[in-house]
Image: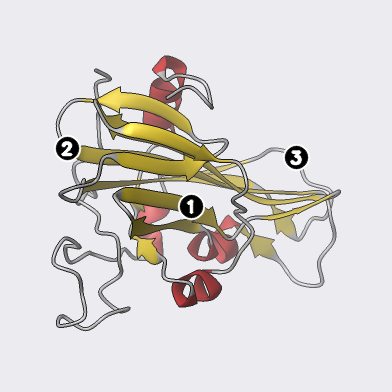
Amino acid sequence: MTKMLFWPFLWVSAGLVSCETLSPKERPNWLPLTQSYPESAYQKSIHHYDWKVDPDITNAECYEQFKFELPHGIKRLSLPSKAVVYRLQGREVIGQLKKILSSAGHTDKPISIADYRPKMGIVAKISRGTLHLSAYGAQDSFEGGTYVMLLIGVPEGVKVHFATDRTDEQHLETLIQEGWWPVSTAPALKRNYDRILSDAKLPGTP
C-alpha cells in the first residue's frame, strides 16, 4: 500500500459533482457536497517552467487531488488509457492530477496556467456496475498545448479497464450533456505526485 501524505490545511474529501451544478434534491445520494478554493490556495501547487517562446505565455504545471468513496455495487473502474494506477486498501478512490500548460505558440494576450487550470479536470459517470473516469480540457497541437496527467489509487479487488478510445479534449459543458459529472479537486503538492508516481505501476497495468 502506498503511503499518502496530503496537504492537511487544504485537503477535503472531494465529491463527484460541484455544489453549483445540481440542487440538493437532484444530487445523487452517493455524491457528497464539495468545497471550492480561491485562486490563492493554488500558490504552492503551481510550478512555472523556465522556458518560453512567446513572452506572454507563462508555461507551468498545477497539481491537484481528489478522493471519494467507491459507490456501492461498483466492481470495475474504466480509466483513461494513459492513467497510472496503484492499489489501495479500503473503498476510497484517490487521484492525483497534473495540469500542464506547455506551449511554444504565440498569443495576442498574456496567458498562464491560472487561465487554463479551471478548464481542465476530471469527470465521472456510472454504467452497469462500472465507474468511468475521464479527463477533459486538454488541447494539443504541434506547438504544444494543455494536458492532464492522472495517477489513480484504486481499491484492491476492483477491476481496471483502460479506455483507449476516450479523448481528453472535450469541454466540460459537452460532457455534462452526455451524462458525465464533474469531479471536484483540491490543491495538492508536486512532491506527493512525484513520490506516488515513482512507486506506481506503469500505464496499462491494473
Q: Secondary structure at mark 1?
A: strand
Question: What's the residue at 34%, 66% (across, down)?
Answer: 38
Q: Nearer the viewer, residue 121 or 134?
A: 134
Q: Which residue is mark 3?
A: 51
Residue 184 x, y percent position in the rendering? 33, 59
Q: Position of residue 67 (x, y in %)?
A: 25, 46
- Front residue (pair 16, 117): 16
* Residue at which label 1 appears: 134
Q: Is residue 162 above or below residue 172?
A: above
Query: How much space separates mark 3 and mark 1, taking CA atoms?
Result: 30 Å
Where residue 91 is drawn, which disc sits there? 2
Q: Who comes first in sequence, dot 2 or dot 1?
A: 2
Residue at 27 percent across and 80 percent down: it is 22
Please state which of residues 12 and 88 is positioned toward the viewer in this rendering.
88
Amino acid type at image mark 2: Arg
Q: For mark 2, give the secondary structure.
A: loop
Q: Amino acid at mark 3?
A: Trp
